[in-house]
Image (cartoon, helix red, strand yellow):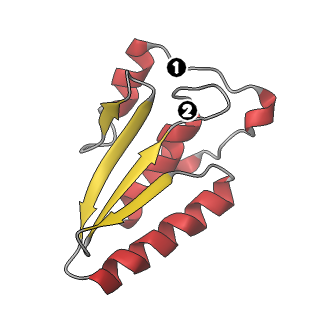
Amino acid sequence: MLKDKNCVPCEEKTGLLNALEIQSKLKKIKGWELEDSNKKISKIFSFLNFSDALIFINRVGEIAEDEAHHPDILLFNYNKVKISLSTHSVKGLTENDFIVATKIKDIS
């Protein structure tokens, strides 16, 4: 299971996922969508207020630091947070992106 895995350092040249692998993994993290010509996955999370959104962002930050794999995070409309994941070093999606997305899903 992805939630039990840890990210592989990007310096070890994590491999790009092919379209079938992406679709298979995407089915396991409901609500996430492909973006940027299938090079990125993202999801928008909604909260009751600004404070809850900030708490969520900090929890995502802890996951990102633990995994050494960092998403783009956008806070907008005071209570919405968009998380986007892509492996910048290979300019596309790797298993690392889905590991972090799965761990984020578990805290939302």
According to the picture, the residue beneath numbered tag 1 turns out to be: 17
Q: Residue furthest left?
A: 48
Residue 31, visible in the rendered structure: yes
The residue that appears at 19% across and 80% down in the rendered structure is: 48
User: Quadrant of residue 50 in the image?
Assistant: bottom left
Q: CB under 8 Å between callouts 1 and 2?
A: yes
- Residue 4 shown left or right of residue 34 in the figure: right
Helix, strand, or loop for circle 2? helix
Image coordinates of residue 55 in percent, x first then y, are 42, 80
Q: How far is mark 1 from mark 2, CA to CA?
A: 7 Å
Q: Earlier in the sequence, mark 1 or mark 2?
A: 1
User: For the residue carrying disc 1, how many other residues have a C-alpha within 10 Å: few (<14), some (14-19), or many (20+)?
Assistant: some
User: For the residue carrying disc 2, how many other residues have a C-alpha within 10 Å: few (<14), some (14-19), or many (20+)?
Assistant: many
Which amino acid does the dot numbered 1 rest on?
Leu
Image coordinates of residue 90 in percent, x first then y, are 64, 25
Location of the C terminus (image quadrant): bottom left
The residue that appears at 35% across and 43% down in the rendered structure is: 42
User: Quadrant of residue 63 in the image?
Assistant: bottom right
Which amino acid does the dot numbered 2 rest on?
Glu
Helix, strand, or loop for circle 1? loop
Q: Nearer the viewer, residue 87 or 107?
A: 87
Q: How many numbered marks appear?
A: 2
Image coordinates of residue 39 in percent, x first then y, are 45, 26
Q: Residue furthest bottom?
A: 51
The residue that appears at 59% across and 35% down in the rendered structure is: 87
- Considering only vertical position in the picture, is 64 above or below 85? below
According to the picture, the residue beneath numbered tag 2 turns out to be: 95
Residue 1, visible in the rendered structure: no
- Residue 97 shown left or right of residue 80 in the figure: right
The residue that appears at 58% across and 20% down in the rendered structure is: 16
